[in-house]
Image (cartoon, rainbow, N blue to C red):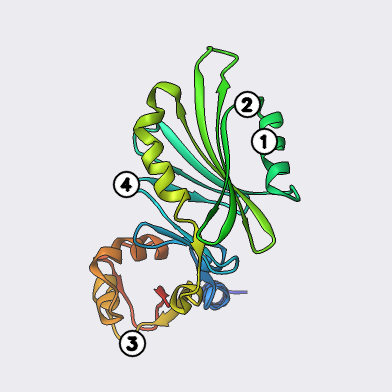
Amino acid sequence: MGRKERRKRLRFCALTHSIQRFEKICHMMRMVDGLIYGEDPKQGYVENNRFYHPEMRFQFPIPQGWKTMNTPAQVQMAPSDGNAMMMLTLTEANSLDEAAQATLEKYKLTLVEKKNQRLNGMPVIAMVSDQVNEQNGQKIRILTYFISYNNLIFTFHGLALQENFDQYVTFFNGTMRNFTRLTDASKINKKPERLSVKSTTRDQTLQAFLQQQRIPEARMREHAVLNGMDLEQNVPRGTLVKVISK
């Protein structure tokens, strides 16, 4: 094989490799088209300082400025100073009294006060207890609401060091006592954000393309990171770009 023929073959191989790589990228991009982006609202979401759970049909307010972490096992909330925490979870107990007693025993709590009441039409036990940290001797005070709703028993804890408890108990009560049934169809049927793959129709910067797709300014950088590009980067015609949509 002559030198000229070898060069032709090398160029052909390089071109074939580029085409295969491009096809692979296109295939991968098409695979993510339509995938849910971020959390699925059906599993619970926060909107305007309120937590909604569409599948389990409940809601409750979150104190202004508190951070929220939602997992399949529990919902946790805490202020920025980290001096308190609230936690909502399900219990396997068959009754409110059984749930309260099991909690006292499991966490070695000392009962301070316990009351049976009805809250927003639901049977509830409100309980205050103390727990001593065995390592440093600090005493933690805990407000707990056991809530019977839809044949399930929810446990809602609010805890802080005993000396800080009075500072946070209003926040605890404000959230727990407003645990209510969710009936608003717009909250129940909230749609998740999804990834949509779009093809550019002309040479332009990523920012110009995103503006054309009516992406809010506040989410431009998020889209740049999502696509592994800079906003000012030129995007050739026919480039596939991931866009967040409803």
Residue 65 is marked as 4
User: Mark 3 or mark 4, which is nearer to you?
Assistant: 4
Position of 24 compared to 172: left or right?
right
Q: How far, Cα to Cα, is label 1 from label 3?
A: 61 Å
Q: Residue at x 57, y 63 (%)?
A: 43
Does residue 237 sit above or below 79 in this rendering?
below
- Residue underneath mark 3: 201
Q: Is residue 98 left or right of residue 62?
A: right
**Mark found first going from the N terminus, 1 or 4:** 4
Residue located 30% across and 65% down the image: 219
Q: Earlier in the sequence, mark 3 or mark 4?
A: 4
> What crowding class fits label 2: few (fewer than 14 Cα within 10 Å), some (14-19), or many (20 or more)?
some
Label 2 or label 4, whichever lies nearer to me, is 2
Residue 113: quarter of image: top right
**For the C terminus, which image quadrant?**
bottom left
Q: Amino acid at mark 2?
A: Leu
**Residue lying at 39% horizontally and 48% vertically, measured from the top left:** 174
Residue 11 seen: no
Question: Distance from label 1 to label 2 (Cα)?
Answer: 8 Å
Above or below for 150 versus 96? below
Count of picture labels: 4
Q: Give the image location of residue 56, x and y in percent.
A: 60, 65
CA neighbours of label 3 inside 10 A, class few (<14), some (14 to 19), many (20+): few
| Residue nearest the observer in this picture, 60 or 188 | 60
Please name the amino acid that badge 3 sits on: Thr
Q: Nearer the viewer, residue 51 or 144?
A: 144
